[in-house]
């Protein structure tokens, strides 16, 4: 059976949305609501809105919205049942038993986490057995202490086709579970064998302390050099960072982003417990958002080769869009942070971090390296590219300072560069204005849901249907005597929400959108949050409701006429709607 609705209502009632969201987002009060930078997309100017009176959130940038359960589902990557369990635990409530298929999924997920924990113990134990000598030698030769090996749970995967299969079978796990957990592979002939063989193993642990996957480094000439777990029900490489479970507790005021496991572990051993690494993939927007939850500053400490510099260039705008202060560490005299620390020591690396360049300086230096400034033609190209870069800066002060730096590098006057930046800024503003004008040419689009599958067929009726729902949310007693039926709604989504809320009202339960978290998809809930945000007054509620119902009934009659074959009426109505809404 599903989770009882009254239990869900109690969880919501005990989970004040401002408090829950405030654990992830820095919120500031403006009037009767709270604002902050959205945790779901990159932004500098706050567009994330929390309304305590309605127990709802809405981002006017990315469009996401909903109640406290939706927020936890999105930010913690949890299912509905898992999010309810998360909030219930936070509120000190005991989850009900026997929640049907959702409980089965939750049980399967927990089983995979327990499997990963057992596998991590197996790999760690093998590191100290005779078969793991090569792995232990590799790690100790890289300068890692036994304490570090234990702290990170490092291990060794035996050079065997069925080492993990046999060991986990003894623990009660079958091959299908190992396949789902990414620990084994099935070939074209149907044979199942260990994914990780003769590799040093790095357990990947999430911010809640669960082992969710593994990375393995080969000890011979095999390819690939590093092999990572595939995405599984408990692991997504784009939403997790290696060692963030430790770095999130750091008091150093920053997070150092490295290219790999060994750099991160070496930094931790040297006392830089704020280091993390992405997991076999380039830095993603999800990674950046994750970092921004725990710090206001990110230092990119990638390798000093061409690939490392290119990766840093890609990472800068991704990090910077989250509002993080971004710096780039240029490693000199060594190929990577690990080698630098071994050669010059911890204090030298600490000074290197303190002298790290902010991302604008770094990008200007990298841009300059692409041109021969002794050649007039290339100098002009450099200045044009530099002007575009500087014009993208939000602060006029930053534009003036870094414009002057570019002018100095090219040996021209700061005033000339200032004019070039001004022209580049004007072009950028004109382009953005044209994009906005094109968007405004189709006002009907503003009335449509962002999700294409939810778009309205009859905008006039749907607008009235939205009004009915807003009135009901403000004053549920309006359900009494309301003649509307769910099937009269032109929008399937709005009709479904009306039916669900009416059913809850008649059962004496909460009539608020957050209570529908299980019945609505994320896109549906986000759109309903947008609907609820629109202004509506209860001053003349009965009259307003009557007007809305009149529109809905009239449009319903027209749809009936169209369905009965009145093609002329259909064409006339389509023309009228397009004209009324700018089509």
Image (tube, rainbow, N blue to C red):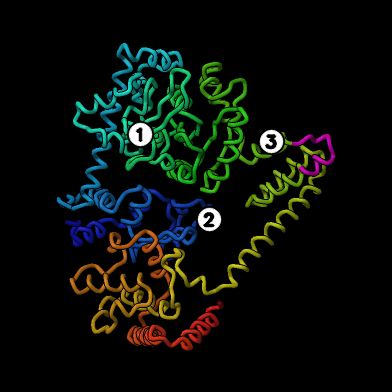
Please report contact status of discs 2 and 3: CB closer than 8 Å, yes or no: no
- Give yes or no for residue 210 being in the magenta stretch: no
Question: Where is 577 relative to 268, above or below?
Answer: below
- Other-residue count near label 1 (Cα within 10 Å), few / some / many at <14 / 14–19 / ≥20: many
Q: Nearer the viewer, residue 105 or 320?
A: 105
In this rendering, would 71 be left or right of 367? left
Q: Residue furthest front?
A: 189
Q: Residue furthest right?
A: 376
Which residue is pictured at 42% across the width and 59% down the height? 64
Q: Quadrant of the N terminus?
A: bottom left
Q: Is residue 540 visible?
A: no
Distance, label 2 to label 3, CA atoms, is 28 Å
**Part of the protein shown in magenta:** 371-381
Which residue is pictured at 80% across the width and 40% down the height? 379
**According to the image, label 1 marks what residue?**
213
Q: Secondary structure at mark 1?
A: strand
Q: Quadrant of the C terminus?
A: bottom right
Q: Secondary structure at mark 3?
A: helix
**According to the image, label 3 marks what residue?**
365
**According to the image, label 2 marks what residue?**
45
């Amino acid at each position: 059976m599903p989770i009882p609705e009254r239990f869900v209502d109690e969880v919501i009632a005990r989970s004040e949305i401002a408090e829950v969201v405030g654990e992830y987002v820095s919120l500031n009060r403006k009037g009767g609501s709270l604002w902050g930078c959205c945790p779901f997309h990159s932004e500098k100017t706050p567009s994330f809105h929390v309304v305590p009176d309605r127990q709802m959130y809405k981002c006017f940038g990315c469009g996401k919205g909903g109640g406290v359960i939706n927020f936890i589902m999105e930010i913690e990557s949890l299912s509905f049942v898992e999010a309810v369990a998360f909030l219930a635990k936070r509120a000190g409530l005991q989850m009900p038993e026997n929640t049907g298929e959702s409980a089965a999924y939750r049980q399967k997920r927990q089983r995979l986490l327990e499997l990963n924990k057992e596998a991590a113990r197996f790999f760690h134990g093998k590191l100290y057995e005779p078969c793991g000598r090569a792995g232990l030698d590799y790690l100790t030769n890289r300068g890692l202490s036994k304490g570090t090996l234990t702290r990170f749970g490092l291990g060794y995967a035996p050079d065997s086709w069925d080492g993990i299969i046999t060991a986990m079978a003894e623990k009660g796990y079958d091959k299908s579970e190992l396949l789902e957990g990414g620990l084994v592979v099935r070939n074209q002939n149907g044979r199942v064998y260990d994914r990780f063989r003769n590799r040093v193993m790095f357990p990947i642990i999430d911010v809640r302390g669960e082992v969710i996957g593994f990375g393995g480094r080969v000890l011979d000439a095999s390819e690939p050099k590093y092999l990572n777990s595939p995405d599984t029900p408990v692991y997504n490489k784009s939403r997790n960072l290696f060692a963030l479970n430790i770095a999130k507790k750091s008091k150093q005021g920053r997070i150092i982003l490295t290219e790999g496991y060994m750099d991160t572990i070496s930094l931790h051993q040297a006392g830089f417990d704020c280091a993390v690494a992405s997991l076999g993939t380039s830095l993603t927007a999800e990674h950046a958002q994750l970092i921004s939850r725990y710090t206001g500053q990110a230092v990119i400490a990638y390798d000093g080769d061409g690939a490392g510099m290119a990766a840093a260039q890609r990472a800068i705008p991704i990090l910077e869009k989250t509002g993080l202060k971004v710096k780039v560490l240029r490693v000199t005299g060594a190929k990577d942070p690990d080698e630098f620390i071994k050669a010059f020591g911890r204090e030298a690396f600490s000074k290197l971090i303190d002298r790290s360049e902010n991302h604008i300086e770094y990008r200007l230096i990298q841009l300059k390296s692409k041109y021969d400034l002794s050649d007039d033609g290339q100098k002009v190209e450099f200045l044009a590219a530099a002007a575009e870069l500087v014009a993208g800066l939000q602060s006029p002060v930053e534009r003036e300072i870094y414009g002057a730096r570019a002018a100095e590098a090219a040996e021209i006057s700061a005033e000339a560069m200032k004019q070039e930046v001004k022209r580049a800024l004007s072009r950028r503003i004109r382009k953005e204005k044209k994009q906005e004008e094109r968007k405004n040419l189709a006002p009907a689009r503003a009335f449509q849901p962002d999700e294409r599958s939810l778009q309205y067929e009859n905008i006039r009726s749907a607008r009235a249907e939205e009004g009915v729902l807003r009135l009901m949310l403000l004053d549920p007693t309006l359900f009494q005597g309301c003649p509307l039926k769910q099937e009269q709604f032109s929008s399937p989504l709005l009709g479904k929400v009306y039916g669900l809320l009416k059913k809850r009202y008649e059962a004496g339960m909460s009539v608020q959108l957050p209570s529908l978290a299980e019945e609505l998809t994320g896109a549906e809930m986000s759109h309903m949050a947008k609907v609820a945000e629109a202004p509506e007054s209860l001053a003349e509620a009965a009259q307003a409701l009557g007007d809305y119902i009149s529109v809905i009934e009239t449009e319903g009659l027209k749809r009936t006429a169209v369905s009965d074959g009145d093609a002329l009426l259909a064409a006339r109505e389509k023309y009228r709607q397009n004209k009324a809404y700018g089509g």
